[in-house]
């Protein structure tokens, strides 16, 4: 019996070391399992995508843009913008010191910024429409230089005169091509043309003069400048 217990003594000394190794191995396995579960939960970083509101994709439909309705502003209209001067070929003049005269006699049949409708769209009248008989003479309201002579699909035959101080006057709905040319200098009262019916404006129809005043591209009320009658 003594020999048996003596032979097992070395084993007792070895067992604590094996237990410690097994315990450490168990902890490593548990740590690996926890790490694996955590990694699975996060997913592959390369596959993470950010959800963008309104993005077209699976289960999402593109929503049409809703634009707020607002009255028509002639300053934003492409055709009206094309009628405004660029002044690139003209020499800047001094602003006239004399009062602006009426280009012709007649009642105002449509005022500046008065609203009219085309279909379901509202528009502002730029300038004033002065009623007159066809063939009535149109005179220069202010001295200046003729900047543009053209036939516009909406305003008909028109001309523009550049004045000093960034001012410009426009005469439209003339009967035929104006009597002046681009680059001509005009004085107040000079004959520019005659009233016609060439415009296609919904604000007014028939014979009238469409008269507008701009400063630096901004439409102004001509009544602020025209001398009292």
Image (cartoon, helix red, strand yellow):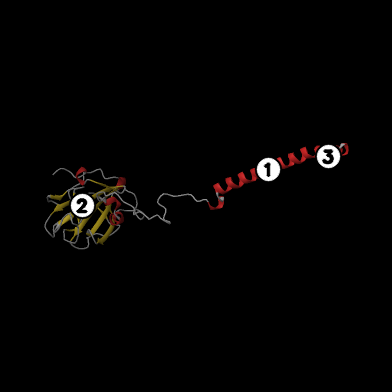
Disc with the residue nearer the chain's start (2 vs 1): 1
Numbered disc 1: secondary structure: helix
Residue at far bottom of view: 176
Label 1 sits on residue: 26
Q: Mark 3: few, some, or many residues within 10 Å (few <14, many ≥20)?
A: few
Label 3 sits on residue: 8
Expressed as whole percent of the image width and height from the top left, the position of residue 195 reads 16, 58
Dividing the image into 4 quarters, which one contains the N terminus?
top right
Is 164 placed left or right of 125 in the picture? right
Q: Nearer the viewer, residue 55 or 199?
A: 55
Disc with the residue nearer the chain's start (1 vs 3): 3
Q: Nearer the viewer, residue 72 or 89?
A: 72
Expressed as whole percent of the image width and height from the top left, the position of residue 116 reads 18, 52
Is 106 placed left or right of 145 in the picture? left
Vertical position of residue 205 compared to residue 50: above or below: below
Expressed as whole percent of the image width and height from the top left, the position of residue 192 reads 21, 57
Label 2 sits on residue: 211
Residue plotted at (17% across, 52% down): 129
Expressed as whole percent of the image width and height from the top left, the position of residue 22 reads 72, 42
Separation of marks 3 and 2 at Cα, in angstroms: 122 Å
Vertical position of residue 177 compared to residue 110: above or below: below
Q: Nearer the viewer, residue 143 or 173?
A: 173
Q: Can residue 144 be seen in this view?
A: no
Separation of marks 2 and 1 at Cα, in angstroms: 96 Å
Residue 194 in which image quadrant: bottom left
Front disc: 3 or 2: 3
Dividing the image into 4 quarters, which one contains the C terminus?
top left
Q: Do the residues labelled 3 and 2 touch (CB within 8 Å)?
A: no
Q: Can residue 109 be seen in this view?
A: yes
Q: Are marks 2 and 1 in contact (CB under 8 Å)?
A: no
Numbered disc 3: secondary structure: helix
Residue plotted at (64% across, 43% down): 30
């Amino acid at each position: 019996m003594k020999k048996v217990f003596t032979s097992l003594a070395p084993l007792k000394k070895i067992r604590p070391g094996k237990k410690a190794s097994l315990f450490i191995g168990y902890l490593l396995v548990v740590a690996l399992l926890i790490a694996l579960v955590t990694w699975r939960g996060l997913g592959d970083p390369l596959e993470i995508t950010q959800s963008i509101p309104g993005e077209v994709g699976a289960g999402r439909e593109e929503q049409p843009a809703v634009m707020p309705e607002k009255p028509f502003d002639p300053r934003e209209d492409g055709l009206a913008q094309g009628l405004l001067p660029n002044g690139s070929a003209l020499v800047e003049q001094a602003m006239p010191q004399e009062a602006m005269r009426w280009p012709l006699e007649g009642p105002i049949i449509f005022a500046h910024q008065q609203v009219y409708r085309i279909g379901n769209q509202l528009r502002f009248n730029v300038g004033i429409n002065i009623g007159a008989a066809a063939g009535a003479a149109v005179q220069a309201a202010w001295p200046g230089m003729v900047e543009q002579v053209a036939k516009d699909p909406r305003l008909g035959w028109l001309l523009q005169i550049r004045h000093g101080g960034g001012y410009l006057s426009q005469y439209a709905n003339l009967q035929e091509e104006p009597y002046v040319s681009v680059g001509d200098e005009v004085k107040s009262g000079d004959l520019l043309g005659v009233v016609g019916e060439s415009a296609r404006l919904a604000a007014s129809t028939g014979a009238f003069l469409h008269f507008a005043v701009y400063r630096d591209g901004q439409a102004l009320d001509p009544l602020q400048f025209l001398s009292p009658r």
